[in-house]
Image: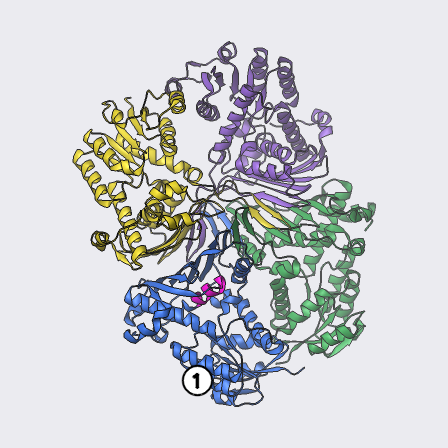
Chain colours: A yellow, B blue, C green, D purple
Amino acid sequence: MTKIRIGIIGAGRIGKIHTENLLRLPEVEVKAVSDLFAGPELKAWADERGIRTLTTDSADLINDPEIDALFICSSTDTHVPLIKQAAEAGKHVFCEKPVSMDIDQTEEAIEAVRKAGVKLQIGFNRRFDHNFKRVREHIAGGTIGEPHLVKITSRDPNPPHRDYIRVSGGLFMDMAIHDFDMARFLTGSEVSEVYAQGSVMIDQAFAEFGDIDTAVTFLRFENDVLGMIDNSRKAVYGYDQRVEVFGSGGSVSVANDHPNTAVVSTSEGITSDKPLHFFLERYNEAYVEETKRFIDSLVNGTPLAVDGTDALQAERIALAAKLSQKLNRPVKLSEISELRKQVTFAH
Amino acid sequence: MTKIRIGIIGAGRIGKIHTENLLRLPEVEVKAVSDLFAGPELKAWADERGIRTLTTDSADLINDPEIDALFICSSTDTHVPLIKQAAEAGKHVFCEKPVSMDIDQTEEAIEAVRKAGVKLQIGFNRRFDHNFKRVREHIAGGTIGEPHLVKITSRDPNPPHRDYIRVSGGLFMDMAIHDFDMARFLTGSEVSEVYAQGSVMIDQAFAEFGDIDTAVTFLRFENDVLGMIDNSRKAVYGYDQRVEVFGSGGSVSVANDHPNTAVVSTSEGITSDKPLHFFLERYNEAYVEETKRFIDSLVNGTPLAVDGTDALQAERIALAAKLSQKLNRPVKLSEISELRKQVTFAH
Amino acid sequence: MTKIRIGIIGAGRIGKIHTENLLRLPEVEVKAVSDLFAGPELKAWADERGIRTLTTDSADLINDPEIDALFICSSTDTHVPLIKQAAEAGKHVFCEKPVSMDIDQTEEAIEAVRKAGVKLQIGFNRRFDHNFKRVREHIAGGTIGEPHLVKITSRDPNPPHRDYIRVSGGLFMDMAIHDFDMARFLTGSEVSEVYAQGSVMIDQAFAEFGDIDTAVTFLRFENDVLGMIDNSRKAVYGYDQRVEVFGSGGSVSVANDHPNTAVVSTSEGITSDKPLHFFLERYNEAYVEETKRFIDSLVNGTPLAVDGTDALQAERIALAAKLSQKLNRPVKLSEISELRKQVTFAH
Amino acid sequence: MTKIRIGIIGAGRIGKIHTENLLRLPEVEVKAVSDLFAGPELKAWADERGIRTLTTDSADLINDPEIDALFICSSTDTHVPLIKQAAEAGKHVFCEKPVSMDIDQTEEAIEAVRKAGVKLQIGFNRRFDHNFKRVREHIAGGTIGEPHLVKITSRDPNPPHRDYIRVSGGLFMDMAIHDFDMARFLTGSEVSEVYAQGSVMIDQAFAEFGDIDTAVTFLRFENDVLGMIDNSRKAVYGYDQRVEVFGSGGSVSVANDHPNTAVVSTSEGITSDKPLHFFLERYNEAYVEETKRFIDSLVNGTPLAVDGTDALQAERIALAAKLSQKLNRPVKLSEISELRKQVTFAH
C-alpha cells in the first residue's frame, strides 16, 4: 500500500496533536514538518517519531513532490497564502479555523482550492465530538421533530494571554466561531440575522484591545429557528461546552464530560469532580476523528465533513456578530458587505 | 387570637388554590368569596370549606368591614380598579400578575396603595419555589462571586386556548413576565435594555392575533450582567422551568422537578419519567409559601416578598420586549414611554 | 355525610403526624386522643385542632361508642393488647410497625382482628412513597421482565438514643423490618431463607446491648430471586433510602430525594445539597397517602394496602435475620419456630 | 535508548489489545508473538505492526535471549507452567487472571517468580479504571473516614458461549474474581470470611455444568468491614460496573460510563443511551494504563501495581465463595485448605 504523505506546517500545540493522531493511522506517513522556530527540541521530537524532514520554511513542504497533503497549523494570517500555494501545488489541505479574519480572503482561498480541484477540510473539531455528533444524529433522525430553538454554552476555563488577545480577532471571530459552526451543523440550516451583546467582566485587557470577555449572541435562521449562544472567557470550574436543541417533538441536550463518575456524599453535601479541563482533554477523541475523516476522504473519496464554505459561513456570522455588537442592532447576513465598509474595528 | 379575615375575588382555578392554602393557616379565616359566575357547584365548594359568604359582586367584599385583606384572582382587566377600591376601603391586597397591561394603570394602582397605607403583594409565585430560592441564596451568599450571565428557560407543556390567546396580552406580558421577574429576583439588579425576537412555530392562532409562540429575549442589566430567556408555548415533555446563573466564582443551575427518581435501564436505553406536568404540580408548594408570606406580613409586619414596584418593573420589561420584537431593535427601558406612543399592538 | 370518627392512642411524634394528616381529610373527624403523658401543652395542641377529648387512658377511646377506628401509635409492647381490645370493641385499627417483637403475639392479634371482622392496617409507610410505588409499578407491569436481584439500601442519619437502643428489639426488628417489608412489596414474593451479618462500627452502646449498628442481610425468595439489604445507623450525609431491582428485561432503581435541584460548579468541584434529612421529610407524603388509603378502605371498602399478615411476615424475616446473625449461618423461615427455642437474645 | 523487548504468548482478543497498547509506548518493542493457531491472518497482522517473529511455539519466546518480558495471554491452564518456565529463563511476566484455578499451583508460580527474582504483574485491569482509581484515592485520602460497607455491582451484557461455560471455572473463579480483587483494592484490607448464594435465572447451560448465572457474595473483612457483591451474566442494558463504599465520614460511589451525555426529552419520557457495551469499551484506557505501569516497573523500578499475591488472594476468596455456595454456609478463608479436600466441583 502506498501511504498518504503528509506535511505539517506549524508545529505548535495543535500541529503536534494532529501529528500524533496521524501517526496512529497505518495508511499515513508524516513525512515533513515546518516551523518558523524549529530548534533542537523539535528535532528530537520529530526524530523520535521517524519524521524525515524538519525545516523552517513551509515552501520546502509545498514544493516537495512526494507530499500529498498539508496540515496548516500556523498563525491565522498565514492561512490564506498557504492554502493558495498548496492548492497551486496540487496538494490537499487541512486548515485550522478561522481560515481568515477577512471574508474576502477566505473566498479567495476557497476559489483557489476549487480551481485546483484539491480538497480543503477546516478544523471545526467539535463536529466530531461524541456528544455533539449524537445531538446531530437525533435532530437529523427526527427524534425531536422540527427544531425551534438552539442553545449553545461555550466557556473557556481561562482567558488567553494579553499578547494573544491583541491579535485574536476578538471573541466572536476567535472563540464563538466554533459555536457559529456548531449552530449550522446541528440545525443543518443557514443563519440569516445576528444580534450580539458583550461585556468586559473578567479582565480589563479585553477592553484595552476593544474586545469583550462575556457575550451573548442571538441567531435567526432562514427557517425561523431561533438560536442563543453564551460565551465567557473564564469559567472557574473548567471548560463548559453544552448544547440544547428544542423542537416540536421534544428536546435533546448534552452535558459536559467528566474525568470520572465518582460522587462523594459527606456531611457537607454531594460532590463530584469538575468537567474535563480544556479542549485538549474534552476534544481529544474529536481531534483523532477529524484527522481520520480527512484521510478517509483522500484515500476513499468520501465527502469532506467540513469544507471551505463552512469556514466562510461561520466567519460571516462572526463578522455580523462583531458588527451587531459594535452598532448595537441586529445585523442581517445580507448587510455585512455594506456595513463593514462603514465600521472599523480595533482588532 | 383574632383571625385575619380574607375575601377572595374570582374563584377560578387560581382563586381556589389560594383559598385551599389559606384554609391550612390557623391564623386565617376565609370569610367570603365573590365570583361573577357563582352557581350551585361553587356554593357547595364554599360550604364544605365553611366559607360564610358567596356573592357575584366583588363590592360586597370590598365593603365588608370585617374583611382585612382581599385576594384578587379575577381577570387582568379588573385588577387595577379592584386594587384602587380595595385600597380606598383600607384593605390589604394580594393580586395576581400582571397588575395591568398598561404600565400607567399599574402606577396608578401602586399610588393608590401607597396613599392608603395598605399592603400589596403580587403573585410572582416562582420566587417561592424551593429551587429558585436556593439559586437566589447562593447568589446573595456569594457562592458564585459576581454574576455575569443569567439564563432562564421557561416553556409550557401546552398552548392556551385561542380565546385566551386573543386577550392574553401576548407572550411577553402573559408568560415571559414571570421570567422577567425571575431575572430581577435572582440578580437583585435592574434591567436597562431589552432585545426580543419571536417566531410562530407551534400554532397559527398566535399569528392570527399578532402574537408569537416561541421567543428569545436578551436583557442587559444596569451592572452589565447579560441575560437570556427562551420561551415556548409547547414543550411536549412537560413544564420546563430552569435557570442558570454564571459568575466570576462559578455557576449555579437548577433542573426540573420530577414526580419520582426512578431510572429504568433496558435494552432500549435509560429512561425516566417526564418532569412535573405544569405549574399546579411544579409550584404547588410555592403557592402555599407565597400565601404564608403575605399573611405573615399582615400578622407580624414582616416585609412583603414581592410588591407593586416588582409588578411594574416586570411589566416595563415586558413592554420593552414587545416593542423590541415589533421594531426588531434593542430597546432601552428609558425609551418605552416615548416608543409606545408610536407603536400599536394587535393585543 | 357522617364522618368517620377516629381516636389516636399515643400522641408522640408519629401520633401527631397521623392526626394532622387525618385532619386534612374532609370525611374524617379526629374525636379523641389518649396519651399517658397528656399535659397542658398537648391540651392546647388538641384544642387548636378542635379535638373534643383528651385523656391519659386509652380505654376511654376503646370504650367510646362514637369512635369507628383507632390509630395505635403507642410503644410497641402495647400494640398487641390494644389491637385485641380494639377488635373486641369492634373498632378498625391502624397500627404502627412492628406489631410485636414476638411473632406468636402478632399471630394472636391477627386472629383477634379476623374474628372480630375489623380491619387492621400496618404502618409500613414506605409502600406509599412516590419512588418505591413507581418501582413496584414497573415490576408489576413487566418493564424489567422477571426479577433476579433486589437491592435495598437503608441508612439513618443518626443512631437513636441509648435508652431507645436498649428496648428497640435490635437493628433487624426495629430498622431493617421496613426493608424486609419493602423486599416483599417490590417482588410480590415470599422469602424462604435469610443470612445476616453485622458489625458495631459506629457506637459501642450497640455492643453493650448485644446489638449491631451496621448490617448486611441476604434474602432468598421462594422463586430463587436473591436479595441484598445493607443498613447503617449513621449516614453523615442524611437519610439514605434507595432500591434497585434487576431482572431479565433490565433494571429499575430509585435514588434519594433532595430538597432542591441546585447544582453549584466552582473551582473546587460540582456540589449539590444533601438528601432530605430523615423520615419525616422523606416520607411526608407517604404518611398522608397511607392515611388516605386506610380511610378509603373504611369508607369505600377498598382493599387494605398492608395488613396483619404483612406485619407477621416482616417480623418472621427479622427474627430469621437475628437468628442468622447470632448463629452465623443461613436460616430458613421454616426453621425459626424451632431455632428460637434454642437461642436467647439480649434484646 | 535500548528498548524493552516483549514477547506475547497467545494472540487472541486480549493478547492483541496488549500488543496494540505496547506499540504506543516508545520504550517498548514487541519482538515476538506465539499463538497455537498462528496462520496467514495473524501473520499479516504481525507484519503490519513490524513484529519480527511469529511462532506457534511459546518456547521460542521463552528461549529467546533478546526478550525481556512475556505477556501470558493464553488459556488459564497454561498460565502456571508458562510462568515457571519464564521465571527460570529470567524473564519478567505479565499474566492474565486468574493465574490458576488451583491455589496450590498459583503458590508454586509465585514461588518460582520469587526465586528467579523476576517481576510478575497480574491483569486485574479494573484497578486502573479512572472511576475505581478515584474511589480508591478518596478512601486512601480519608474522604469518607473509616470504611464500613463495600458494595460492588458487576454484570455482563451477555453470557459466554456454552463451550466457555464448561471450562470457565465457574462464575466465582471466572467473573467475580475481578470483584474480589476490587474489594481488596478499594479497602486495602483482607477478607476473612465469605458467604455466597447463586441461582440459575438466565440460561440452563449453567445448571448443566454445575454453575450459576446470578450470584450474591457477602464478605467480612478482617477489620469487620462488610462487603456485598452481586453478579449477573446478562444485563440487557449493557455492562454494569459500579461500586459504592460507605464509611464513618460519608460515601463514595461510581456510576457506569456512557458513550455520550445526550439526554432526550419527549412526550414518552426522558431517555439516554445505554452504558458502554462491554469490557473492551469500558476498560479501554485501563488496559493502556496497566501496560504502562508494568513497563514503568521494568524500566524505572517502580513497584508493581498488582502482583502474584493479589492473584492468590482473589483466588482464595473465589474458592471460599464456591465452597460456601455449595455447602450453603459461611466459609472462613482459614478453612478452605481443609474444606476443599471434602468437596468436589463439577467445574
Quadrant position of the N terminus of chain A in the picture: top left
Quadrant of res C196: top right
- Which SS does the magenta portion mostly show? helix
**Whole-percent x and y of residue B227?**
41, 59
Label 1, secondary structure: give it.
Answer: helix
User: Which residue is depicted at the point 45% across and 81% down?
Assistant: B109
**Closest to the observer: C128 or B55?**
B55
Q: Is B180 colored magenta in this rendering? A: yes
> How many residues crowd around disc 1 within 10 Å: few (fewer than 14), some, or many (20 or more)?
few
**With A53 as the anchor, is A233 left or right in this view?**
right
Question: Residue D140, relative to residue C237: is it above or below?
Answer: above
Residue B26 visible to an observer of this rendering? yes
Q: Residue furthest front?
A: A208
Q: Is C11 colored magenta in this rendering? A: no
Which three-letter amino acid code belongs to the residue tagged 1?
Pro
**Total marks in image:** 1
**Whole-percent x and y of residue B10?**
47, 81
Question: Residue D13, relative to residue B116: is it above or below?
Answer: above
**Closest to the observer: C118 or C289?**
C289
Q: Which residues are magenta?
A: B178-188
User: Which residue is depicted at the point 54% across and 86% down?
Assistant: B90
**Whole-percent x and y of residue D202?**
53, 40
**Whole-percent x and y of residue C184?**
63, 53
**With C342 as the anchor, is C145 left or right in this view?**
left
Residue A219 visible to an observer of this rendering? no
Q: Chain of mark 1?
A: B
Question: Residue A317, relative to residue A73: is it above or below?
Answer: below
User: Which residue is depicted at the point 72% across and 34% down?
Assistant: D222
- Which residue, given by chain and number where applicable, does mark 1 sit on? B81
